[in-house]
Amino acid sequence: MSQQPQIPLGDSARLKAVTLAAWVATLGNLLLALIKVGVGLATGSLAVLSDGIDTAVDVGMGVLLLLAAPFAARPPDARYPFGRKRAEAMVAKLLAVIIVLISLQLGWAAIGRVTASEVPEMPGMWAIWVTLFSIVAKLALASNQYRLARRSGSAMVLANAVNMRNDVITSIGVLAGLSLSRLWDAPLLDPLTALIVAGWILKSGIDIYRSAARELMDGVSDPEVYERVATAAASVPGAHNPHRIRARQLADRLAIDLDVEVDGSVSVNEGHRIAHLVEDAISAAMPEVIDCLVHIEPLGHGEAHDTSFGVNPVGECPGNDHINKA
């Protein structure tokens, strides 16, 4: 059973939470990036340098958060009737592309170091101490970003939090590689560790890209939303067979369309009243819903039109075999 979602913050409170997350991420990562890149260059450790460049990407994420958050918080208007909340997904997608490109560049540099004829230089002890400091600092930053992501429901902040969590894992890998390279007197482990880090960064970028693309293509992160909509709609007396349910993600909010059948003998006013009750029931059960459109049909005639779009309560799409939960 899915966990009941938190009541979304108001636009002003949400903007403050996202802005706070952006400032914390930007300043914290800027300090770490300068330290790690400097120590990586000074000690000759490609793994630490790669870790530092990855952290520099996080600085860019924080800056883009600061730029995109006020735009995404603007209210709907004639040009953007659904608002601008998807600006966050657009930024997350751009960041994902940048992360993928940087990971490929780091991987290529690591391969070049591994296949070089000369033996790599043994990294200095400063590389180990800086990596230890980075792990502790990144744990604190990741915890902060996850907390603010849950509070704000921001895709951008969540992408930042996931990336920082990955940074902790990569830094642990870097620390292991550095320690073993000195313990076994095997400097080749440093570029090999950098190659593994590059692969992990690549996976992180792909995951962020897929999540952002899903939202931009009118997908939802949790397909169970359709069952929740159907359950809420069916709880209204006089509302039957909720079907062709469509949900679109708008950052931390949802816009819902669905068809509901009513007794064909009731008046237009009664059908209209039932439709409003369905909207109220869905909004009460799902606080994240900001817009709900109910189409009323005569009982027994719900499938008399095009069924190419929408999802049935059982989780099957009328025009397809199953929901794609990817």
Image (cartoon, grey):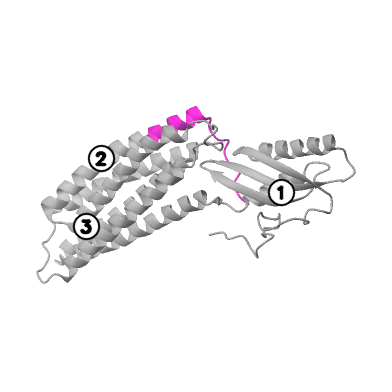
Q: Which mark is residue 47?
A: 3
Dot 3, crowdedness within 10 Å: few (<14), some or many (≥20)? many
Q: Which mark is residue 30?
A: 2
Q: Is residue 210 above or below residue 62?
A: below
Q: Is any atom of residue 172 visible in this view?
A: no
Q: Which tag, 2 or 3, sits closer to the chain's start?
A: 2
- Amino acid type indicated by mark 3: Ala
Whether pointer 2 and pointer 1 mark residues with C-beta atoms closer than 8 Å, the reply is no
Q: Which tag, 1 or 3, sits closer to the chain's start?
A: 3
Q: Is residue 280 above or below residue 126?
A: above
Whether pointer 1 and pointer 3 mark residues with C-beta atoms closer than 8 Å, the reply is no
Q: Which residues are magenta?
A: 1-21
Q: Is any atom of residue 213 visible in this view?
A: yes
Name the spot of residue 305 as percent of width and height, x first: 75, 55
Q: CA distance from mark 1 to mark 3?
A: 51 Å
Name the spot of residue 193 as percent of width and height, x first: 25, 62
Name the spot of residue 51 as percent of width and height, x first: 25, 52
What residue is disc 1 on?
230
Q: Is residue 49 magenta?
A: no
Name the spot of residue 301 as percent of width and height, x first: 82, 53
From the viewer's side, name the closer residue of 136 and 102.
102
From the viewer's side, name the closer residue of 286 and 266.
266
Residue at (71% x, 36% y) in the render: 280
Identify the element where label 1 is drawn: helix
Residue at (82% x, 39% y) in the render: 271
Residue at (33% x, 56% y) in the render: 100
Q: Quadrant of residue 141?
A: top left
Q: CA distance from mark 2 to mark 3?
A: 18 Å
- Amino acid type indicated by mark 2: Leu
Dot 1, crowdedness within 10 Å: few (<14), some or many (≥20)? many
Locate residue 176 relative to residue 66 in the image: left or right. left
Q: Nearer the viewer, mark 1 or mark 3?
A: 1
